[in-house]
Amino acid sequence: MSKSAILTILFLSLFPFSLSAQENETVLIHVNTHNVIGALKPGLLGANTPWPNNGEGLINGPPHYALNREALAILDKLKPTVLRFPGGSLSSSYNWRAGIGQRNERGKGLDFNGQPTEMSFGSDEFIGLLARLASEGLITINTTLPISENLEWVKYLQSKTDLVKYWEVGNESFLPTDPSYTTPEQYISLFNEIAPLIKAEADIAKVGAILEGTLHGLPWASQIVPRIELWNESIIKGTKESADFYSLHLFAPMECQDDDESCARLILAAPVQMENNLAELTKAVHEINPRASLYVTEFNLGLMDPKLMSRWSKTPVQANFIAQLLMIFIRQKIDLAAYWSLIENNDFGMFLIKDGLSIRPAGRLYGTLRRLAGAQALAVEIKGSYADYIAAGTVPEGLKVTAVDAVALRKGTETALLVVNRRTDQNLRLNISINNNPGRVEAALLIVSGQPFDESAPGRPLVSRPLALSDQGVILPAAGTAILKISPIR
């Protein structure tokens, strides 16, 4: 034996921690197949479809304005179950009449930059997309228009299709920067007047009122939303006789540190606070209006700095963030969720086609989960360490952020585990048990490959790839999101 080998053995015997520091931490995940806690409801796999720029590229330009073949090829795989239209803040200035009829006779509307834009993707094109994808429609009405004008839109859509199932009264009407801004009292009065009229025109329709979700419970929120502490409770109480559902939006963490490591840790901690918000609002809805459902009609990573938003929306960290939110929606029994947004839309779309076909990290996540729509969700217990972060934006101090989050999904005879690693600096070894017996991972797919800070781009996609299997457990990379096919060892 060489002198160097002897010295190495002596060193390791004196300092055994130097070896263990290089090993992957093991996280124990216990699945209880006897305890069903919810479901991956099909309605959770919805998305938003803004109308500007030919529906952000969903249809081609003149002369034919046909559905874009490249977009359809991806949409046929994603199969969004619900599509929301006309999209976010744009709904508060949307004139539906300007978007119908012959295209050379249509008017213009304001795009996200406030610029007049031809309304080539209007109500009829939206209906066509619903029919093509067998999706259900959710319409956000423009509350700045007279009630009579909105009812005419209801009649128009009902005369064309029965696929529009949901009507949302306003967008972010609590926000001073939204054109539909109003007081809780005024909103309640409007809602209670229009909701029964919509139902009279569309007897199978569900009508929903607006809640605030992103800033809920934050001590400084009133600086942005006046009387925010009154909005949610007032709206639920004031509309309990008329509302079939309540909708809210979730974006976080809004602010972020300059260095990648700190920013990524904050992003992956943010969903913990969002689950706290949802739990409180779910409880309030169930106590005050138990027949109503809770919908999340917009959600995504949210950062005020456009450069940071552009950077992080293309990374494995963003897919991890979205996977966490979907797991939260399952646990909190949310019935419908619409990702912001389906295509293009600066840094938000699931996929891009304008500068070359590119599927974003969230698009790969949705494509993977689509076959599990309708699966039962099973109770999961996780034993492992916690991830640290520095509080900023909508993420307060003191959250307990487990290194791993997971939900088990059973569909037919198959049981899958959707799992994320919230650690950005360490791979984690996953050890699975089922009903207190050893479990086997039969297959494992890393939904978005690459390092935590890598960016997907046309020609440089972050694709899905299989994870290696071993008797010692699956290694989940830092900030990774994976789907595992699991079974008990018999």
Image: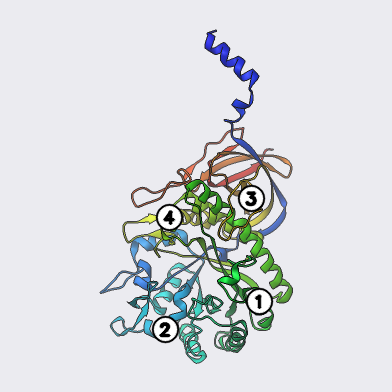
The residue mark sitting in front, 3 or 2, is 3
Q: Which of the numbered marks, if any, corresponds to residue 95? A: 2
Rendered position, 213 above or below 227: above
Q: x%, y% of residue 56?
A: 37, 68
Q: x%, y% of residue 389?
A: 59, 49
Give, as a three-letter code, the residue at label 2.
Answer: Asn
Give, as a three-letter code, the residue at label 1.
Answer: Leu
Sooner in the amino-acid sequence: mark 3 or mark 1:
1
Sooner in the amino-acid sequence: mark 1 or mark 4:
1
Sooner in the amino-acid sequence: mark 2 or mark 4:
2
Sooner in the amino-acid sequence: mark 3 or mark 2:
2
Viewed as shown, does residue 111 lie left or right of 468? left
Report, in whole angstroms, how far the alpha carbon at label 2 lies from the one at label 4: 31 Å
Report, in whole angstroms, how far the alpha carbon at label 3 lies from the one at label 4: 26 Å
Residue where numbered disc 1 is placed: 230
Q: Is residue 333 visible?
A: no
Residue where numbered disc 3 is placed: 401
Residue where numbered disc 4 is placed: 360
Q: Residue at x 60, y 74 (%)?
A: 211
Q: Residue at x 61, y 33 (%)?
A: 472
Give, as a three-letter code, the residue at label 4.
Answer: Arg
